[in-house]
Amino acid sequence: MQPDVEVQVFRSGTEEVVSKVLAEKQAGALQADVLLVADAPTFESLKSEDLLMSYESPELDGISEEYYDADHTYTGTKIISTGIVVNTDIIDTEITSLKDLTKPEFKDEVIMPSPLYSGAAAYNLSVLTKTDGFGWDFYQQLKDNGVKVDKGNGSVQTAVVAGEKGLGMLADYMAFRSKADGAPVEFIYPSEGSLIVTEPIGIVNGTAHEAEAKSFVDFILSEEGQEATAEIGYTPVRSGVAAPEGFRSVDEITNLTYDTAELAASREADKEQFSQMFE
C-alpha cells in the first residue's frame, strides 16, 4: 500500500522494547513512530506516560470493543492464546486444564516462560493471580511440582519439541508451527478459557510520520491486513476473517482476562512477587 515508505524495525521482548522507548523518551530522542508489543496492560502503561496519540482507525468494523482502547490510543491486531503444548511422545494422559500442570504425575515435566522477560507471561501472571480458582496458590503449586521457568516462549517451544520437557505453557502459533514442522506436539486450549494477548498497535505521540503511521495501522486492521495475519499463522482479531487451520477463531475463543487498568497497575508488583517466589 505504501511501497515508497522505508521501514526500520527494532524487535525484541516486550520488556526490552518498553525499556528502550522509555529511555529514549527521557533523553528526548524517541525514534519509534509505531509500537507493536504483546499486551494491552503494557499499552496502558505507555498511555499513562503520554507516549501514545489517539487515532480511531476507520477499520474497526468487526473488531470487538474488548480488544481496543476506548480512547483509541491502541488497538489489538491479532489473537495470541497461551495454552498447553504437549509432547505426545512423553505424555499420553489427556490434558484439558491449566490446573493439570500441577498434578503429581507431571512433576518436573512442565516448563513456562518467565514474566520477567515475556510480556505475554507477565500478562498471564497478573490475570491468573486475580482469577478465582488460581491465584498465587497456582504458581506455588507449579513451583512445588518442579516447573522450570525459562526466558521466553521460544525456550518453552524448544524444550518441549526436543523432549526435554513433556508439557509447557506456550503461545498457540508456536505450538502449531512446531506441529506443522513434524514435531510430536499438540496444542490444548484450556477448559478454563484462553489467556489472550492481542499484540496491540499504537502510534507514538509526536511522530514526524503521522500519515504513514496511520496508513500502516489501517492496513493491519483492514480485512486484507487481517487475512495476511492469518496467512502468516495467527488468529485474526477481526471477526469474520478465517483463522489458520487448527486454530480457534476470535469468535470461538473464551477470553480469560481481567480489568486492563488493574492489570497494568499491579504488573510490576506481580513480577516482583513472582521473582521472590522463584528466586
Image (cartoon, rainbow, N blue to C red):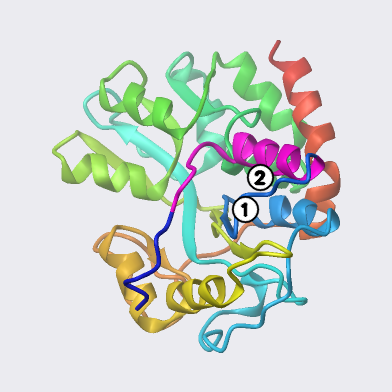
Q: Which residue does the image show at 17% across and 46% down from the upper left? A: 180
Position of residue 126 measured from the top left corner of the image (x, y, whole percent): 73, 42
Report the predominant secondary structure element of the magenta stretch: helix
- Position of residue 196 in the picture relative to residue 206 (left or right): left
Kind of element beneath mark 1: loop
Under mark 2, the amino acid is Tyr
The magenta stretch spans residue 23 = yes
Position of residue 127 measured from the top left corner of the image (x, y, whole percent): 71, 47
- The answer to which image quadrant residue 205 occupies is bottom right
Q: Which image quadrant: the C terminus?
A: top right
Residue 201 position (above or below residue 226): above
Observer-nearest of 21 and 28: 28
| Residue 1 visible (yes or no) | yes
Position of residue 173 measured from the top left corner of the image (x, y, whole percent): 35, 50
- The answer to which image quadrant residue 242 occupies is bottom left
Tag 2 or tag 1, which sits nearer the N-term? 1
Magenta range is 8-26
| Tag shown at residue 123 | 2
| Tag shown at residue 21 | none
Kind of element beneath mark 2: helix
- Position of residue 223 in the picture relative to residue 130 (left or right): left
Can you identify the residue that label 1 sits on?
39
Whether residues under marks 1 and 2 lie with C-beta atoms below 8 angstroms apart, the answer is yes
Observer-nearest of 219 and 196: 219
Residue 148 position (above or below residue 188): above
Which residue reaches farthest left?
Answer: 182
